[in-house]
Image (cartoon, coloured by chain):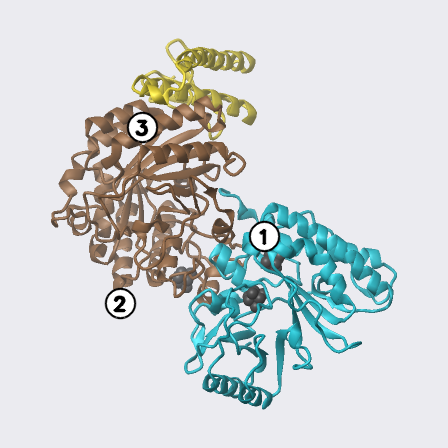
């Protein structure tokens, strides 16, 4: 059935659950000053030195007992990673060479991945990098939707919107990565544009839209109603136009909005299971714990490439459970499934220096999403005259 | 529920637990603060435990302290002046030979810094004859190496031999690292911040003395009471690793947790491994005492094939 | 054949894993080769890496082809002139594809 197929398609990311994710924070700088960006300390000075990257690669490939996952995704992140494309290219070459020379099993199962604001996508150095790594590369370009929405949040330092500068690169990107997906972030100001933005991105030829509302404390009274109305409008457009046959929007997911069994106690967020390498060679459980992401809390490193991973500092991340960090109302919540959190924001918003206090600013937004999902799946079921899931 | 208040009457009092400090100069809690502390405990029906230092306290301090029912933890050298107090033996030898009056059995704490680890079994043996109960607490766990952990295993084995001999003779002093696990059927941990708080000389309340010495945020004050946020994270229910563990006697030391993993509810590998060496030593000792009453009536401790419960939880790997 | 792609068989999970590793390795060797060309000498500890790589590329290509030859013979897969076989790594299903179809990057027969 299409409904289940949709779900399967969305869940099947490369080597899911089998690939270690290692992220290099190659620069903390970016051309944009997106309004929802968690990277509060953007900083043109801190970029990764190749020597640091080399030391990190040597450590990571050497510590096979710790990193024994069958596959690996080497990710490059910023700031804006493509501002350091030459460095990324050099690190990637070194990774390939060392995986091969050391006979590491990851040589037979790796990917490079990066997420960019798209401004430098057609730069010849970027294109050369794509050519060299064609079968091992995935690149995501962030477009926030229609020009109005995109330009509200994704602005240059002088306040100009970046829509035109990004969208001109979409056709080239789609030629090179026809299955590419984009990531959309929704904050308070862009709520009125959710529906048309998703439709617009599909119109641009990007068939998969991974979209989420921000976890931060930005939501105002009435936002949930507005959000629900947008999603209901989008649901109507999808069902009426039979767009579900070809397109995906992660807001609609048949598994969300159910109560969770206490035994279903997994952490949501992957921090700690991945590893981010900072500009100075520090290891973080995720980029969100690096200095440039932290507003009012100390960064939380879990080691560095000279001394290796500090297993004690990593333990709290790997031991995280849903219930140990959730307030009683979440434990008893009737619509808990699919209600997400970000460990980095939890840490930053917590009353003490802990990753074990779940921030629930998105509570009403999740509930609105659940209501809209019920509407969507119900309409779809009636349209198809069958049982979706 | 909070039921106890520890009072650091002198900030230079030697450590009686896992925490450490290097304060040698007397740092008396001001008398007015002591009075307010006693009133604070009285208002909330908290049982008082005083922790004075090596220096004799001025009489007006003793007058305030003795005015209410209380317990005390004192350097063993002061045994005579505090007839009912728990005596702390400093393994560096300052108070090692001191104790209660001849023939008297007292409660002892043997606090063992890392550099005296190799003397542990002998020190336990020396205390056994005069103890009604002996608590052994290791210091400097944050600096333990694999070799130290191995040494601790050896010392436990030796100490178990001495304890077994004493038990066979019919004397039954409790020794926390052996008998607690034998006697317990559920978690019984330190519970700092939950069951007890510490009032420090600065008039503030702390989760335990270690938090005061390390300059951590106070948990409250005598004026405002407890202001500590996220107190639920000090409880067993919110400690995912400890919730799956049966080292019931373990202190589950939130001070060490905070120091080594930066989270109150997450133990370090060192703490878990040391507690499991004790658990396993208790298991073997109980087997060994087999038919000796009352040990014959105790439930056997099951064998387990791990030393760190963290290794048993499915998410332990860096990537699932 | 009317469809661009039609299922004609399947292999076992072990067989699928075998060709997946060969496919990944073949691509990885090819892309390492592209990288070596522009790499500074100090990162190429020994130039013998070129020879090893070229030898490895040859051997991997041979093993890759041998897998398809051996499996197609064993399972008797339909063979149409101008078409190629393709495997879906998720399911282990084998397809026959017309050249116009974008079979490309799914471990297809060369
Ligand atoms: S944040 Fe709200 S919607 Fe989410 S689980 Fe908690 S109570 Fe439920
Ligand atoms: S938390 Fe408890 S066990 Fe740990 S040092 Fe403090 S009082 Fe001792
Ligand atoms: S051994 Fe470790 S997991 Fe068990 S109670 Fe002690 S600290 Fe917790």
Task: Please tell me whether mark 1 sits on a helix, a strand or a loop.
Answer: helix
The hue of chain C in the figure is yellow
Task: Please tell me whether mark 2 sits on a helix, a strand or a loop.
Answer: loop
Q: Which chain appears brown? A: A
Q: Which residue is mark 1?
A: B270
Q: Which residue is mark 3?
A: A90
Task: Please tell me whether mark 3 sits on a helix, a strand or a loop.
Answer: helix
The hue of chain B in the figure is cyan
**Label 2 lies in what chain?**
A
Quadrant assignment for ligand 1: bottom left
**With A232 as the anchor, is B57 left or right in this view?**
right
Neighbour class for label 1 at 10 Å: few (<14), some, many (≥20)?
many
Q: Quadrant of residue A172?
A: top left
- Disc 3 vs disc 2: which is toward the camera? 3
Q: Which residue is mark 2?
A: A221
Residue B117 visible? The answer is yes
Separation (CA) of disc 2 from disc 1: 48 Å
């Amino acid at each position: 059935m299409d409904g289940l197929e949709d779900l399967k398609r969305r869940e099947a990311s490369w080597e899911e659950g089998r690939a270690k994710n290692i992220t290099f924070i190659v620069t903390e700088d970016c051309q944009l000053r997106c309004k929802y960006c968690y990277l509060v300390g953007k900083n043109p000075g801190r970029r990764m030195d190749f020597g640091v990257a080399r030391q990190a690669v040597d450590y990571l490939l050497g510590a096979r007992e710790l990193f024994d996952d069958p596959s690996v995704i080497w990710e490059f992140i910023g700031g804006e990673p493509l501002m350091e494309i030459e460095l990324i290219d050099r690190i990637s070459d070194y990774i390939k060479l060392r995986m091969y020379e050391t006979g590491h099993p990851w040589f037979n199962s790796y990917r490079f991945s990066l997420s960019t604001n798209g401004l430098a996508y057609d730069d010849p150095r970027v294109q050369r990098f794509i050519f060299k790594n064609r079968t091992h590369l995935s690149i995501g370009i962030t477009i926030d939707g229609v020009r109005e929405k995109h330009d509200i949040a994704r602005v240059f330092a002088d306040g100009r919107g970046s829509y035109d500068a990004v969208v001109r690169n979409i056709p080239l990107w789609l030629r090179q990565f026809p299955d590419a997906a984009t990531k959309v972030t929704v904050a308070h100001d862009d709520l009125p544009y959710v529906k048309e933005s998703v439709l617009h991105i599909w119109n641009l030829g990007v068939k998969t839209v991974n979209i989420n509302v921000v976890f931060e404390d930005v939501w105002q009274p009435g936002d949930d109603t507005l959000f629900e109305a947008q999603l209901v409008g989008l649901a109507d457009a999808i069902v009426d136009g039979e767009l579900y046959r070809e397109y995906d929007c992660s807001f609609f997911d048949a598994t969300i909005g159910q109560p969770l069994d206490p035994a279903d106690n997994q952490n949501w967020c992957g921090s700690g299971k991945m590893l981010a390498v900072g500009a100075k060679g520090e290891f973080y459980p995720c980029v969100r714990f690096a200095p440039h992401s932290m507003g009012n809390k100390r960064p939380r490193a879990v080691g560095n490439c000279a001394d290796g991973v500090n297993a004690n500092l990593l333990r709290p991340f790997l031991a995280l459970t849903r219930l140990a960090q959730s307030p009683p109302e979440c434990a008893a919540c009737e619509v808990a499934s699919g209600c997400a959190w970000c460990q980095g924001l939890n840490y930053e918003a917590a009353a003490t220096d802990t990753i074990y206090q779940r921030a629930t600013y998105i509570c009403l937004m999740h509930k609105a999403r659940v209501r809209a999902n019920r509407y969507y799946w119900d309409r779809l079921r009636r349209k198809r005259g069958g049982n979706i899931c | 529920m909070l039921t106890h208040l520890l009072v650091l009457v002198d900030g230079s009092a030697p450590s009686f637990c896992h925490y450490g400090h290097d304060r040698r100069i007397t740092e008396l809690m001001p008398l007015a603060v002591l009075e307010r502390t006693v009133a604070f405990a009285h208002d909330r029906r908290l049982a008082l435990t005083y922790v004075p230092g090596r220096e004799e306290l001025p009489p007006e301090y003793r007058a305030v302290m003795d005015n209410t029912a209380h317990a005390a933890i004192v350097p063993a050298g002061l045994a005579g002046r505090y007839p009912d107090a728990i005596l702390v033996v400093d393994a560096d030898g300052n108070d090692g030979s001191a104790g209660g009056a001849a023939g008297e059995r007292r409660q002892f704490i043997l606090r063992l810094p890392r550099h005296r680890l190799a003397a542990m079994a002998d020190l336990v043996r020396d205390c056994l004859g005069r103890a009604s109960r002996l608590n052994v607490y290791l210091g400097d766990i944050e600096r333990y190496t694999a070799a130290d952990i191995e040494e601790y295993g050896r010392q436990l084995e030796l100490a178990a031999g001495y304890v077994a001999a004493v038990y066979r003779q019919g004397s039954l002093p409790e020794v926390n690292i052996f008998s607690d696990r034998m006697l317990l059927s559920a978690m019984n941990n330190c519970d700092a911040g939950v069951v007890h708080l510490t009032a420090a000389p600065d008039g503030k309340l702390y989760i335990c003395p270690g938090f005061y010495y390390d300059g951590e945020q106070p948990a409250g004050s005598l004026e405002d009471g407890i202001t500590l946020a996220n107190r639920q994270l000090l409880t067993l229910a919110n400690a995912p690793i400890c919730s799956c563990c049966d080292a019931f006697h373990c202190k589950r030391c939130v001070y060490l947790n905070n120091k080594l993993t930066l989270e109150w509810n997450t133990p370090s590998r060192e703490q878990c491994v040391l507690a499991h060496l004790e658990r396993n030593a208790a298991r073997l000792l109980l087997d060994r005492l087999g038919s000796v009453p009352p040990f014959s009536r105790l439930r056997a401790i099951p064998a387990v094939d791990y030393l760190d419960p963290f290794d048993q939880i499915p998410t332990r790997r860096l990537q699932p | 054949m009317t469809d661009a792609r039609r299922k004609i068989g399947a292999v076992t999970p072990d067989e699928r894993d075998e060709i997946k590793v060969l496919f990944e390795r073949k691509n990885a060797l090819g892309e390492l080769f592209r990288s070596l060309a522009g790499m500074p000498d100090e990162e190429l500890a020994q130039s013998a890496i070129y020879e090893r790589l070229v030898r490895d590329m040859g051997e991997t290509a041979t093993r890759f082809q041998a897998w398809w030859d051996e499996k197609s013979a064993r399972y008797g897969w339909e063979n149409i002139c101008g078409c190629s076989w393709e495997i879906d790594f998720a399911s282990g299903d084998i397809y026959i594809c017309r050249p116009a179809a974008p079979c490309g990057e799914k471990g297809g027969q060369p």
